[in-house]
Structure formats: structure tokens, C-alpha cells
Image (cartoon, rainbow, N blue to C red):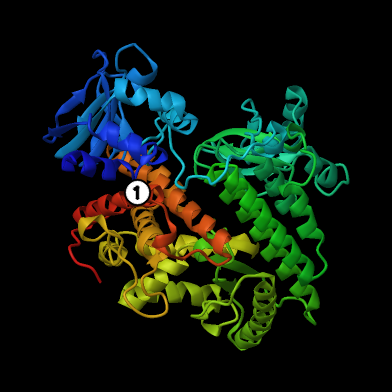
Amino acid sequence: MTNSIASRIADFLSGFPPFSLLERTYLDLIANEVKVMYFEQGRTIFAKDEKVHNYFYIVQKGAVDLQKLDDNKEPETIDKCDEGDIFGLRPMFAKENYQINAITDEESVIYAIPLEVFKPYAISNPHVGNFLMESFASNIRNPYSNEHRGKLIADEEDITFKKEALFELQPIPIIKKMVTASSETSIQEAAILMSKRKVGSVIVVEDDKPVGIVTDVDFRESIATGKLPIQNPISEVMNSPVICYSKGLTIAQAQLTMMKHNINHICITKDGTPNTKVKGIVSEHDIIVSQGNNPAVLMKAINRASSTKKLKRIRNKIMILLNGYLKSNIPLTHISNIIFELNDATIKRTIQRCIEKMNEPAPANFAWMSLGSQGRKEQLLHTDQDNALVFEDVSKEKLEETRAYFLKLATKVTKRLNIIGYEFCPAEMMARNPKYCLSLSEWKEQFSQWVTTSGNDEILLCQIFFDFDISYGDVKLTNSLSDHIFDILKGNRNFLNRLAAQALRNPSPLGFFRQFLVEQDGEKKDLFDIKKRGIMPLTDAARLLILEHRVKNISNTSERFDKLAQLEPNNKEIYQACAYSSRALIKFRTKQGLKHKDNGRFINLEDLGKEDKIKLKRCFKTIKEIQELIKIRFETTYYL
């Protein structure tokens, strides 16, 4: 007679690795020996230093916190396990006592798998053994683990590569003993200081924050040629603003940045912006140029490209590079930074070539702004182009004439970007649209109107246009626009509350029984919209919270959450989970897009394995948690 309980246990186990790797006959034998355990919330399954059990465990229902003790001997959650997650593998590989606590986070049903029954199958099946060893060694499962973050998508094949192939993704050497000076320091004093310290640059600081940089090249071009007397202040020869990054800058990213901005030094600050204390400097001399085909080679090709067709071919190579990085499981932060720089250089080169084709020079200084995912440094695939243009204020008589010039330029640029692979925006949020080709004063007036009106449409436009990044032109214009935005938001709690309500318009994408909410009708019926239901809620939440803290110059979603984790230590865990989930969902979408040769937005859930679905659901749990935080903080209890 068939044991119905054991049969149901086997059915459950068959959907999760490593049990899914076993034949049904073996699975039935194991299921007959499984112990079913029920725990109320807050119960201890095992504790640190406790003698190891004769079982390891898998969550059937509920959730389990894995905790370690911090320096103050307080428990800190390092991982969360829910349906299908295994834990407590120490007795499988080591005889010493448990090193962590396992505490139920909610009412839970746990299956205990006897070691003596399961171990023979782990030994005889190398795939099962490898899975367990990797899980035990790394504890990789979900976004709550800061030290051991796992893959969102299981690789279909093992990717091996030489260490040299990833040379450009290694951290760049940072010189911490840099030379600094105030802006009033004379050129002669700075030169003497550089000579004495035997360095090639001096960072000009105010309140320990970088405002400029002077290199030996600047001395050669401005002083040796007699353009400026050596008694003048160093501020007259310094380069400003300073290009800044935080620590962790890779060799590839440093190379791309130096080539893009035609510089040979990069300043390292606490948060990667000029708003915090300078921590070090990176010099071109500190970089050993990697050999072979790499991002630096593509950057050089972009800068030399003499036609749109060549830029399109280079863009295809960038996609190959992206696919290779993803298969090699390179951290998405590094991938995003590199692809952003290559995309940005492509846009810049396109604009340069279009300016050359105009019959006359630009009538005023201007800046080309990338919006949306490119503005947030999150655009990896061929998605819609969202952009705008701001030009400096001109007289009323010349306003429309000036606008006509930039509209003509923008039409040329957007057309060529479309050829390269960036589709036209269906909503015409592009610089060729007169609505989004404005003078600085017009843009300031436009933002003031959007903020003060605060209707649904205005809030939506703010969400799009608040995430901008300069791709070409005069940075003073975009800085002025950014300052204006923060000025009109100062003390405007009503607008933030409206922004909060809008950020909650897409609730957690899981319905009853943890099922995905898919499209109900139309062309995309039964498909899952990962952008609308997964990525956008996190993007909107990060934007809202970073605006509340009035933090400038950070537009990337995961970087915003990382910054929020620093600003609010009491919410550190949820912000770190959101930062991870943001990167993981973008990575998931990118892989789907590359696989299906589209933008990866709509996903057929039938194509996904159970493991991928579970990992996606785990990421979506953070959406619910961050939205609960927003509801409480902004006293917002409804969706728009």
C-alpha cells in the first residue's frame, strides 16, 4: 500500500535541488524516512555551538532566519530561507558544532532529512554532492545575505575562464597619500609641494571635499608656456569639476573614464561624488593596460568611429561583451558601470558627429541629458531612448531661433541612435520634442510647475525626469537644474507624500498563494511584466527615499539603496536587500532579453524552472517590505 504522506513529501522534494537531481525511486525511499516538524514563530531549530543533529533541513512552509553573532554578541540575520531552501548542512561535511542559529521567522513546517539515508546518494551522484558542497561553503541563497550573495539565475553551463581574461575587472590600485591644497594656494607653492612629495598631481579641496585637480600636464600647458604667472592662485589652473568614484573602481572602469573625459587622474571619495571627503587618487600610471579585446578597445573604437554603421557594429560587440560577462557571473555592479560608459560614449560620439554635420556652430552652450534607465546607469539592453536637451538662457528675441537649431540637432541625433539600436520612445520623451528641448529657465519653470501641480501626470513626469545624467555638453547647466530641483523640494512634504503614493502604484507582484501576477489581456496576456511589477517599484522607492534625504549625484537604484543603508543604520538590512534585488532583477531581465533577442521586459513564466521562480519570489518579498516602510513613513495608505 502506498504511503500517501511520503508520496506528497517526495512530490514536494522533486521540485527543488538537490532532490530534483535524483531518480524518483531514490526520492521515494528518502521521503519514507523524512521527519515532518512543526515550529511556531521564533522557535530555535538549532543554535550556535549546539552539537550537530543527525538531519539537515528543508523549508516546506514558512521561513527560517539564519543568524550569526555580531561583535556585540547580538544576533544578526545573514540569510533567510523559505519554501524549498535547505539549511543545516554542517553535519554532512563537518563534525564540529553549529556555527550559526536557525530561528523560525514565521510559523513553519520543516522537513528533516536523515543524514544516514541521504548521504549515500550524495556520494554516488556528483551533481548532488557538488550542489551541497557549494551551498554549505557559501550559504548563497538570497538578498538578505550580505557576504554570500547568490546567483539569481542558475547558469545552464559551467563557464571557465583564465584569470587574465578578467584582469580589467580587478580593483584599481588607489594612492591614499595624495597631496591636497586649498584654492588660495599659489601655483608656485603647489608646484613645490608636488616636487617635494614626488607626485604628478595635487587635489584642490574645500572642507576636505574635492573641488578641482591640477596635474603636471596643466603646469606644462599653462605655466611653462607663460599663460599664467606662478604667483596666481591654483584655482586659476585647476580642472573642475573633479571626476570622482568610490573605492572598488575597476581597471576597466578607470580606463573608460579617463578616455571618455580625456583625463589621467580620478579622485576617490567616500561615496563616489564630490560631496564627501577625498580618500585617494588613481593615476594613469597606476594602470597596467590589459591586452586583447576588452572594454578599453571598444571605447577607442567608439571614439574613432566615422559613421553610424560603425557605431552600430560596435554596439553589437558590446552586446557580445555583456553576454560574456553575464555567463561568467561577473558582479552586475561592474557590468553596469562598464556598459554604461560604453553606451554613454556611443551617445557622445553620435552627438559630436551630428554637430559636425550642422551648417553652423551651436548658438549657445547646451547639455544632452539621458533619462530613465540610461540616466540611472541601468540600461544594458536595447531599450527605448529617453532624452532631453537644456540650453543656456538667451534673449527673448533669439529664443525660438536657438530652439530651432537644437531641435534640428536632436532630430539628427535621435535618428542615428535609432539606427544604432535605441528604439524611439513611444511617448516621444526625446530631445527632438519641443516639450523637452528647453532653455535653463524654461526647464526650471517646468520642474516648478510639475512639483507644485503634483497631479498624477506631473508626478509621473517628475519620476522620469528626476533621473537624468549628462551625456554631452556643459555640466554647469545640469548642475544648476539639479540644484533647482532640490531647492523647490526643500520642505515640500506634500509633494513627497504624493510621490510616495505614486511609488506604491505597483504593489508586490505576488498574489494569493504566492502566485505571479501576470497581464490579464492584450498582446502580452499571461506574460509577466518584470519592469512594471519588479524593477519599477524598487526604482520608485529608491528615488523617493534618496530625495527625502536630499542626496545629490546618485541616480543608480542599487547605489541609492546602499547610500540609504549608510544613512539609516536601523533599516540597513531592508535597504541592502533592496539593493541586491534591484541588481538581481535587472540581471534577470538582461539574461531574458539576450536569450530572446528583445528588451527582456515580458517573460513567459512557463519557460522558467522552479528554482528561478522561487528566487524571483524571494526578491519580490523585499518590494512588499520597502513599500510597507514607505506607507508608514509617508502616512500613505492608498494606491493611485
Q: Is residue 251 left or right of residue 332?
A: right
**Quarter containing the N terminus:** top left
**Quick one: which residue is furthest to the left in this view?**
40
**Quarter containing the C terminus:** bottom left
**Quick one: which residue is furthest to the front in this view?**
1
Q: Position of residue 482 (x, y in %)?
A: 48, 61
Residue at 51%, 62% in the rendered image: 373
Q: Position of residue 114 (x, y in %)?
A: 27, 24
Q: Quadrant of residue 21?
A: top left
**Quick one: which residue is furthest to the right in this view?**
225
Which sits in the foreground, 568 or 481? 568
Is residue 373 in view from this perspective?
A: yes
Which sits in the foreground, 450 or 174? 174
Which sits in the foreground, 120 or 563? 120
Q: Which residue is mark 1?
A: 614
Which sits in the foreground, 318 or 528? 528
Q: Is residue 422 left or right of residue 49?
A: right
Amino acid on which the number 1 mark rests in the picture: Ile
Q: Position of residue 455 (x, y in %)?
A: 30, 77
- Is 536 drawn above or below residue 184 in the view shown? below
Label 1 element class: helix
Label total for image: 1
Q: Is residue 354 left or right of residue 330?
A: right
Q: How many neighbours does mark 1 have within 10 angstroms: few (below 14), some (14-19), or many (20 or more)?
A: some
Is residue 273 in view from this perspective?
A: no
Q: Position of residue 576 (x, y in %)?
A: 37, 41
- Is 261 drawn above or below residue 598 in the view shown? above
